[in-house]
């Protein structure tokens, strides 16, 4: 019997990669895509565990899951950093580069 390709195995891998790249887009895109990749990876892993002889492509799922976790961590760190900067410098300083530079010079 020929093995079937595991559903969403390639999708999990692609979403995991894009979640790492998406962490630079204010963190929200990477966070959302990472969570979606983890949910799809959980479903694919459960399907593979029921019938391991029927499906192939579990390595793509495992790799995509690891990449999604990295993407979630990076996105979370970016969001926390942005919130910290807004709380420390203020929203006006974040939007105005000259005011931000002045505040940074005053700190030195």
Image (tube, rainbow, N blue to C red):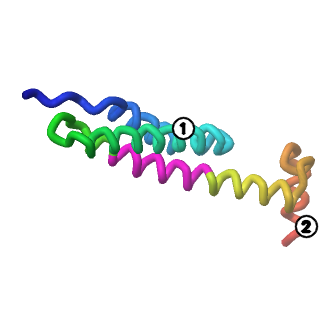
Q: Are there few (<14), some (14-19), or many (20+) residues within 10 Å of tag 1? A: many
Q: Nearer the viewer, residue 38 or 79?
A: 38
Of discs 1 and 2, which sits in the foreground? 1
Residue 64 picture quarter: top left
Position of residue 23 in the picture relative to residue 44 (left or right)? right
Q: Nearer the viewer, residue 34 or 3?
A: 3
The percent position of residue 10, horizontal first and vertical second, equals: 34, 32
**Mark 1 and mark 2: span between their CA atoms?**
39 Å
* Label 1 secondary element: helix
Q: Is residue 64 magenta?
A: yes
Image quadrant in which the C terminus is located: bottom right
Disc 2 designates what residue?
A: 106
Give the main secondary structure, helix, strand or loop, of the magenta stretch.
helix
For the residues bearing labels 1 and 2, Cβ distance under 8 angstroms: no
Disc 1 designates what residue?
A: 33
Chain-order first, disc 1 or disc 2: 1
* Label 2 secondary element: helix
Give me the residue at 27% from left, 41% from top. 48
Image quadrant in which the N terminus is located: top left
Give me the residue at 20% from left, 42% from top. 52
Position of residue 54 in the picture relative to residue 70 (left or right)? left
Q: Nearer the viewer, residue 54 or 103?
A: 54
The percent position of residue 69, horizontal first and vertical second, equals: 48, 52
Position of residue 22 in the picture relative to residue 83 (left or right)? left
> Residue farthest to the bottom?
108
Q: Is residue 69 above or below residue 54?
A: below
Which mark is drawn over residue 79?
A: none
Magenta highlight range: 62-75
Residue 90 picture quarter: bottom right
Q: Is residue 71 magenta?
A: yes
The percent position of residue 33, horizontal first and vertical second, equals: 54, 38
């Amino acid at each position: 019997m020929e093995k079937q390709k595991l559903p969403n195995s390639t999708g999990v891998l692609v979403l995991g990669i894009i979640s790492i790249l998406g962490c630079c887009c204010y963190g929200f895109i990477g966070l959302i895509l990472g969570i979606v990749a983890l949910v799809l990876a959980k479903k694919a892993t459960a399907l593979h565990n029921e019938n391991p002889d029927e499906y192939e492509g579990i390595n793509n799922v495992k790799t995509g899951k690891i990449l999604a976790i990295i993407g979630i961590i990076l996105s979370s760190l970016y969001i926390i950093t942005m919130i910290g900067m807004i709380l420390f410098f203020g929203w006006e300083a974040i939007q105005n580069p000259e005011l931000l530079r002045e505040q940074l010079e005053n700190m030195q």
